[in-house]
Amino acid sequence: MAIPEFLTDTVKDYSKQATAAYSAPIDTSQFTGRQFVAGQDPMQTQAANLATQGVGSYSPYLSAAQTAQTQGAGALGSAATAVGGLGALQASAAGSTGAQAYQPFMSPYQTDVINATLTEYDKSRLGGQQSIRDAAVNSGNFGGGREGAMMGQYNADSLVNRAALQNQMLQQGFGNAQQAAQQNFANQGSLFNMQNQQNLANQGLAGAYGNQMNQQFGMSDFNRTGMGQDINALGSLGALNQGQQQAYLSADQQAAQTGAYEPYGRLNQYGNMLTGLSGGVAGQQYQDPNQSNPWQTALGTTMGLGGLYGKIFN
């Protein structure tokens, strides 16, 4: 197709401009590279450091809970031992009651003491028998009925008194043994109460250790939850700041890229205009490459990072 004469100079000018523009390489470093990537916001750095510090932060609380659990188990074991002792005390106290409860407390020497006492008593009564015989001899009634009656009465009185003395000593021994049995029963009751109080104290201590263990677990959960919330807040705000900064950088990048490709767009429009003037069909309209909304892109990144921070320690 022949170029109209009135467009000859214009086409020559276009050719010179196109040759100059397309022969010069585009410096892509002006709109590509890491300089257009927003760095980590200080809040994000703080959130990352806090997350690192929080790893294993539950360990002291877990150790304290384990210690409380061990101590609680020991207190329960002591309580169980005390319960066993209470059963033994109950059995022992039960043996201290009843009609035969006095027997274990009878003196092992009581029989010897009674026998010795009665022997001395019998010896002391021999003197009285001799006095009756001597009186009978002096009165000329030795061997007579009067002596026999007096001797019989004397011996009968001796037996009665001997039996009374023996009963008195037996009763005294029984009373002492019964009193000792009653005192033992009272002592067993006091000891039972003491051990029962100790048992209740051990059970209460076990419960206190259990509460302490639960509190340690609660503090651990609170620590991690609170730390997670702090990390979430810092990370989300930091991601928002980073997204805003990324929007600025993306806008600068887009501006630099648009400026770099601007001559090609202008020449494209210039050429299409000349083609139309010369009667030809204009080519496709030039468009800037990779046009996007910097804020929408940064916002998507921000939302993704914010959600990630929210999942830490959850």
Image: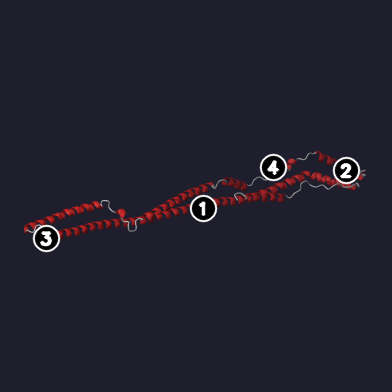
Q: Earlier in the sequence, mark 4 or mark 3?
A: 4
What secondary structure is marked by label 4? helix
* Residue type highlighted by circle 4: Arg
Q: Position of residue 139 (x, y in %)?
A: 6, 59
Say if mark 1 contacts mark 4, CB within 8 Å: no
Q: Position of residue 257 (x, y in %)?
A: 75, 44
What secondary structure is marked by label 1? helix
Q: Earlier in the sequence, mark 2 or mark 1?
A: 2
Q: Earlier in the sequence, mark 3 or mark 1?
A: 3
Side of 213 where 24 appears, left or right: right
Q: Earlier in the sequence, mark 2 or mark 4?
A: 2
* Residue type highlighted by circle 3: Gly
Q: Which residue, given by chain and number where applicable, does mark 4 sit on? A: 34
153 w.r.t. 280: above or below: below
Q: Of the residues tagged 4 and 3, which is closer to the observer?
A: 3
Q: Residues within 10 Å of mark 2 (few under 14, many from 20)?
A: some
Q: Of the residues tagged 2 and 1, which is closer to the observer?
A: 1
Q: Which residue, given by chain and number where applicable, does mark 1 sit on? A: 214
Q: Which residue, given by chain and number where applicable, does mark 3 sit on? A: 145
What secondary structure is marked by label 2? helix
Between the C-alphas of marks 1 and 4, the distance is 51 Å
Q: Which residue, given by chain and number where applicable, does mark 2 sit on? A: 11
Q: Earlier in the sequence, mark 1 or mark 4?
A: 4
